[in-house]
Image (cartoon, helix red, strand yellow):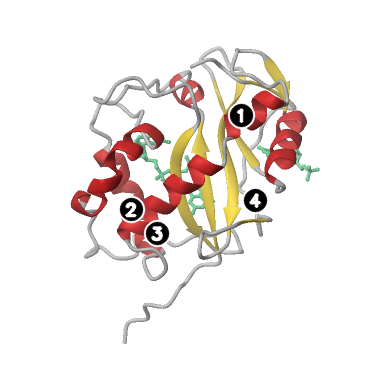
Amino acid sequence: IVCTCQDFDFFYFVQQWPGSYCDSNKSCCYPNTGKPASDFSIHGLWPNYNDGSYPSNCDPDNHFDPSQISNLTRRMQREWPSLACPSSDNLRFWAHEWNKHGTCSDSILNQHDYFATALNLKEHINLLQILRHAGIEPNGELYSLASIKDAIKGGIGYDAWIECNTDPSGNNQLYQVYLCLDTSASKVIDCPVFPHGKCNSKIEFPQF
Ligand code: 5GP
Ligand code: 5GP
Ligand code: 5GP
């Protein structure tokens, strides 16, 4: 008997800053749909366990099927662009996210609802606006990690985890923002566990 019950404890909702993805040694390529907006974009919605581990690639028979999200494509192109090289129409990135992560929460969110839920979250949680209100702008300046975290906590009410990467000259920069969601992905919660990885106490917020 195959268990189709929910088998994870919470979601990470992960957004990326395109300026930091591109401003790294691996560089980036704009998708065929053009240069993405100067805004955070979705990386993924990832089921996770409270011990920090996570399920992945849960159902090889449950393939990504673009026809199930055809009514979301325009919003997906805007909010979930792929910056990996070579340039693509983004479908490869969405398929990767569905196959690796989405198949593990399919008992809660089917393929259409998985992507629709991430889009709705992105459109409600305006990180760039929250940071701007706190005087934190993507202008290449350094900001304290604490000030970034305080601004997000003030704007959303919950702690975020910041992932940093480094630019080619070795500067630490704001790369990804992790928020935690309950198992229905309907509300932000306190993270049961945070990811790992170090940021300097002051990090760059590069332009894009
Ligand atoms: P990286 O090694 O670059 O941090 O992550 C590579 C990939 O592993 C991510 O794109 C994501 O698919 C997965 N991953 C890394 N850390 C986590 C985590 O804490 N939870 C989940 N669910 N996936 C993760
Ligand atoms: P993860 O496994 O960490 O969920 O996703 C990372 C994978 O998605 C990598 O194979 C990466 O090449 C691909 N990818 C495609 N576009 C993007 C993008 O815009 N950002 C990130 N972080 N990964 C991307
Ligand atoms: P604390 O729990 O005292 O706030 O932080 C413990 C350690 O985690 C410190 O080294 C601190 O710099 C680091 N840290 C706190 N918040 C974050 C974050 O959002 N991202 C990263 N990468 N490190 C953090």
Element type at mark 1: helix
- Residue drawn 37% across and 51% down? 115
Amino acid type at mark 4: Phe
How packed mark 1 is, by other alpha carbons closer than 10 Å (few <14, some 14-19, many 20 or more), is some
Q: Which residue is mark 3?
A: 56
Question: How far is disc 3 from disc 4 in space, using C-alphas?
Answer: 18 Å
How packed mark 3 is, by other alpha carbons closer than 10 Å (few <14, some 14-19, many 20 or more), is some
Position of residue 106 relative to residue 15, above or below, is below
Element type at mark 3: loop
Question: How far is disc 3 from disc 2 in space, using C-alphas?
Answer: 10 Å
Q: Is mark 1 within 8 Å of ligand 3?
A: no
Q: Are marks 3 and 4 in contact (CB under 8 Å)?
A: no
Element type at mark 4: loop
Position of residue 66 relative to residue 131, above or below, is below
Amino acid type at mark 2: Trp
Question: How far is disc 1 from disc 4 in space, using C-alphas?
Answer: 24 Å
Residue 178 falls in image quadrant:
top right
Q: Earlier in the sequence, mark 2 or mark 1?
A: 2
Does residue 65 appear left or right of residue 207 in this picture? left
Q: Nearer the viewer, mark 1 or mark 4?
A: 1
- Residue drawn 54% across and 59% down? 186
Q: Which residue is mark 1?
A: 129
Does residue 87 appear left or right of residue 22 in this picture? left
Q: Which residue is mark 2?
A: 98
